[in-house]
């Protein structure tokens, strides 16, 4: 008689299997030594669970796969939760800055898609955002763009967070939503 196998031996393994990662960039770096140059590789990786948690990390090693592994481990350790509206977009427009990198992130209506370039697109895909408009200003350095984007994302506040901080109800913060079915100007 065959024994039933347990799928969930370690809950951390199950959690890691749900995490997606995107390789943003690899740099070849050289160290000049007495006999010539010694080459190494630096990798930049973004990871997320596509449900509101995202992180980034970088790693350096003599071989590319080892650098990617180190970067992925670093990214998993630095994951943060970002509140999303309806699980698909941001709650409000935000600006982020790191060094010479500036980013503008705007919430978008359903069906817009991810309108963002390079490293920011990787962050939004891993985060689970489906509709957003983003613009990078200043630098094109992926490290600074990612840090500026994370600076913006850490300042996102949901209506629940604002209501809790002010000691009010969420409905007081959002206000009453007007009925969109009635024609404008008719009372």
Image (cartoon, grey):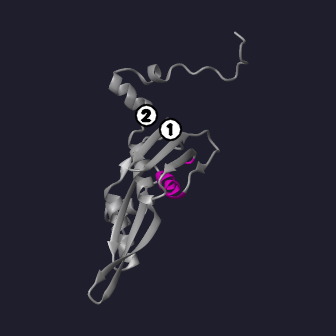
Quick check: can you spot residue 187? yes
Q: Residue tagged by mark 1?
A: 85
Residue that lies at the very extreme toward the bottom in this rendered image = 35
Please tell me whether mark 1 sits on a helix, a strand or a loop.
loop
Q: How crowded is mark 2: few (under 14 residues within 10 Å), some or many (20 or more)?
A: some
Q: Nearer the viewer, residue 181 or 120?
A: 120
In three-dimensional space, the C-alpha distance between marks 1 and 2, rounded to whole angstroms, equals 8 Å
Q: Give the percent coordinates (x, y) of residue 60.
A: 33, 71
Q: Is residue 26 left or right of residue 37?
A: right
Residue that appears at 34% across and 21% down: 167
Whether tag 1 and tag 2 are in contact, CB under 8 A, the answer is yes
Q: Give the percent coordinates (x, y) of residue 99.
A: 38, 50
Which region shows up in magenta? 118-130
Residue that appears at 34% across and 68% down: 59
Q: Is the stretch drawn in magenta largely helix, strand or loop?
A: helix
Q: Does the magenta stretch include residue 96?
A: no
Q: In which quarter of the image is the N terminus?
A: bottom left
Q: In which quarter of the image is the C terminus?
A: top right
Residue that appears at 47% across and 38% down: 94
Q: Is residue 68 left or right of residue 32?
A: right
Quick check: can you spot residue 82? no
Q: Give the percent coordinates (x, y) of residue 70.
A: 33, 69
Q: Nearer the viewer, residue 101 or 1?
A: 101
Marks 1 and 2, the one that precedes in the sequence: 1
Q: Is residue 120 magenta?
A: yes
Q: Residues within 10 Å of mark 1 (few under 14, many from 20)?
A: few
Q: Residue tagged by mark 2?
A: 158
Q: In this view, does 42 lie to the left or right of 84?
A: left
Residue that appears at 39% across and 28% down: 162
Residue that lies at the very extreme toward the left in this rendered image = 34
Please tell me whether mark 2 sits on a helix, a strand or a loop.
loop
Q: Nearer the viewer, residue 92 or 31?
A: 31
């Amino acid at each position: 008689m065959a024994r039933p196998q347990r799928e969930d031996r370690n809950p951390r393994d199950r959690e890691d299997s749900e995490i997606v990662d995107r390789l943003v960039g690899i740099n070849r770096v050289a160290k000049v030594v007495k006999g010539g140059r010694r080459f190494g590789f630096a990798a930049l990786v973004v990871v997320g669970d596509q449900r509101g948690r995202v992180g980034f990390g970088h790693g350096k090693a003599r071989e590319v796969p080892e650098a990617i592994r180190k970067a992925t481990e670093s990214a998993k350790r630095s994951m943060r939760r970002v509140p999303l509206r309806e699980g698909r977009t941001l709650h409000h427009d935000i600006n982020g800055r790191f060094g010479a990198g500036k980013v503008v992130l705007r919430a978008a209506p359903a069906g817009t898609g991810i309108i963002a370039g390079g490293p920011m697109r990787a962050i939004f895909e891993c985060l689970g955002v489906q509709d957003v408009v983003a613009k990078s200003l200043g630098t094109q350095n992926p490290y600074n763009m990612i840090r500026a984007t994370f600076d913006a994302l850490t300042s996102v506040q949901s209506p629940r967070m604002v209501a809790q901080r002010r000691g009010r109800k969420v409905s007081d913060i959002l206000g009453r939503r007007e009925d969109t079915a009635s024609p404008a100007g008719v009372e």
